[in-house]
Amino acid sequence: MTGCKSAPKRLAERLERSISWIATLETAGHSWAENRVPASYAERTIEEARAALASAEQPRAARIASELADVLRNRDQTEIDVHLGALALERRALEARLKGLKRGK
């Protein structure tokens, strides 16, 4: 089925999935920082998101996810905001790219 879609349509779908995974990362990170979820849950969620972002060819987002996983492994509350901020910037960049792609249709 994917072979029938145009390249811009496939890219738009990949961007939409990536944006969703980044939002999941942000939620998991914030939830852990606020002690609303166990670290083990946040770590599993972050690893799943990292793998999905790598598969979606989003290397920057996947790298930030890896760094966020390191923060959780080290239980370093002081560094969480830096990585969540980087994720927010990456999400906005992908949203702008998606918007431009949709505008170009």
Image (tube, grey):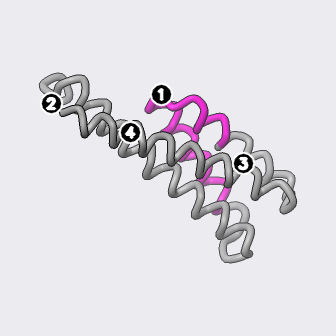
CB atoms at circles 3 and 4 under 8 Å apart? no
* Tag in front: 3 or 4: 4
* Front label number (1 vs 4): 4
Q: Please state which of the two labelled residues, at mark 2 or mark 1, is closer to the viewer.
A: 1
Q: Which residue is mark 3?
A: 68
Q: Residues within 10 Å of mark 1 (few under 14, many from 20)?
A: some
Dot 2 crowding, Cα within 10 Å, few <14, some 14–19, many 20+: few
- List the residue tagged with mark 4: 15
Q: Residue at x 17, y 22 (%)?
A: 3
Residue marked by disc 2: 1
Q: What is the magenta range?
A: 41-64
Query: Of the residues under marks 2 and 3, which one precedes in the sequence?
Result: 2
**Distance of label 3 from label 1 (alpha carbons):** 18 Å
| In this rendering, position of residue 46 left or right of residue 15 | right
Disc 2 to disc 4, C-alpha distance: 18 Å
SS class, disc 2? loop
55 is within the stretch colored magenta: yes
Location of the C terminus (image quadrant): top left
Residue contact between numbered discs 2 and 4, judged by CB atoms under 8 Å: no
| Disc 3 to disc 4, C-alpha distance | 21 Å
Sequence-wise first label, 1 or 4: 4
First reached walking from the N terminus: tag 3 or tag 4:
4
Mark positioned earlier in the residue sequence (2 or 4): 2
In the foreground, 54 or 19:
19
Q: Look at the numbered discs 2 and 1 and tell me whether their residues touch, using CB distance below 8 Å.
A: no
Q: Is residue 29 above or below residue 63?
A: below
Helix, strand or loop under label 3:
helix
Q: Is residue 67 above or below residue 29?
A: above
Q: Report which residue position mark 1 lands on.
A: 57
State which quadrant residue 28 falls in. Answer: bottom right
Q: Position of residue 32 (x, y in %)?
A: 70, 67
